Image (cartoon, rainbow, N blue to C red):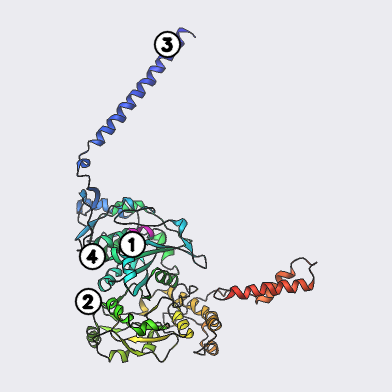
Amino acid sequence: MSRAGIMARRRCVEYVGFVIIIQLILTVGSLWFFREKPHNTVDPESRLLLSMEYLNRNADLVKSASNKYSNNVEIPEAFSSKVSYSVSRSVSSSSSKPSNVVLDLSGLSMSANESEFAIDFDEERTFLDRYRMFKTSLFTVTGTKWNELSRSRKVCLGAQTSIDRASWLIEIVKNWSGPVSIALFTPDVEFHISKIYIKYMQRCFPKIKEQVSFHFLFPVDHPVKDSPSLNEIVGEMSCDDPKKVLDFLVKTRSKEMLAWREPMEYPQNLLRNTAKQGCQTQFTFIPDIDMIPNAGLDLDLQEFLSGPEAQECEKCAYVVPTYEISTTSTHMPANKTELLGFLKQKKARIFHEAVYKLNSKSSDLKKWQAIPMKPKLDVAYMVNNYIFKYEPLYVAKGNTPPFDERFIGFGMTRNTQAYEMYVSGYEFFVLNNAFTNHWGFQSIKTRPKYRALQQMKNNHLFDDFAKEITARYGRDPYKMMSKLKSLNLKNSVVSYEKGKVPPKLKPSPKPKPAKEFFQSSLASSSSSSSTTSTTQRLNKLYGRCLEVKGGHRW
């Protein structure tokens, strides 16, 4: 190698060495710089949390963060009033409600498992429903006193909800001290929103942390999603207005998501079965999340259900009437005496009285309203006249028939289960003092158009359901088989607007009768098969069909 080549090589080596030394200096300097930042010198028990408080001078920052999720998201007053970084200690789990909480959201991944907030979610351990449309994760969040309450109490309250209505749970635990099983619908980013809001409720309302277990359910087509960027706009949240906090969180859903989310067929019955399955007590009570029990109902039921009559009766359902409460009222009635006063002042009325009177017609609630409040909870009277489409809230032993999951969305969801109970021999008894409150008077005008289409679709499924129930129990006390033709539910049209008819549903293709179906299948098989062997194979396949057909779509 020439002298010039040797010199060039030496310069190259020196240059590389110089670059390496500069990189080492920069790396060591960066580590030293960040180690000495003053916010890391705080008490190790404290956590650095992003506290979002909104001031005018930071409006642009807030707006840019919010616009990543949805247009025109308003930051509620439930959050503080300026943006800043602050150090805050973890909120203790005392029995008193804190004024506000700062959530550390760094652990809200799917495998989150903190001492204060444990999420047990593994998508590989979820299971499909019978129609392979939804997946369920049981006991995703378990109450700290869940096992203790489930062992000591006679009845568990099980309810279904989507995250946008979850704040009603706070009202439930004010009046109910027993175990509560909540089936929560969590498609897409509502999974992450649900985790944030459950953690918020547990911190602000310790009863939820103790009493309530949550089960997550989501559609196969829209699986759960974490949204870490959502954590950037969530910080200090006031415990004084949980509804505002929730409204803010759900508004972060994108318009693209809402386009498919709002008209989605909501699996009410699957969710109800999941909530009921979560209950581990002898009796269950399955209202919806916005049906709030009267104060102390769980303790009254504890005494009543311990009696010999309730214990010995295997097919008794104890009806709990539901009343709508006017939004002009300052509060919900706490007991029957107060409810009767609300009725006189026209601040309360029978649930669905203006939109669906058959809902509680069998309960004859005018009779119930004529009975004053009694010292103890007991049976007021028996329901003697079952009327089709009766859908009572009731307390019964946990082995009641499940809610039929073929009915998805609105219509035929709760009343079909009550119909099956009636056919199978259950008797209904109205309780004297018990009731639930539903906030607001119901109106057809507030119902979206897609709900009418879902109701019409479910009506068309009823005939097959009724025939299956008659075959299953070998009974038809309502003479339903002779009434199906006159009911004509298969061809019924549902519309919430006068003079307007919704678009016709596409008719489902009629399946071939079982024998015809298998005969055509066998005809296409090898022609060398003898007539005798073909007949034997047909009978064998047809027999299997009859064994598995019951309760399934056909």
Circle 4 or circle 3, nearest the eye: 4
Q: Which one is earlier in the sequence, the residue at label 4 or at label 3?
A: 3
Residue type, numbered disc 2: His
As shown in the figure, which amino acid type bears the numbered disc 4?
Asp
The numbered mark at residue 241 is: 4
Q: Which residue is mark 3?
A: 7
The stretch in magenta equals: 191-195
Which tag, 2 or 4, sits closer to the chain's start?
Answer: 4
Residue shown at 20% from the left, 76% from the top = 330
Q: Which residue is mark 2?
A: 331
Answer with mark 3 or mark 1, whichever residue precedes in sequence: 3
Q: Earlier in the sequence, mark 4 or mark 1?
A: 4
The 10 Å Cα crowd at callout 3, few under 14, some 14 to 19, many 20 or more, is few
Q: Toward the viewer: 314 or 274?
A: 314
Picture disc at residue 456:
none
Mark 2 vs mark 1, foreground winner is 2
Q: Are marks 4 and 3 in contact (CB under 8 Å)?
A: no
Q: Amino acid at mark 3?
A: Met
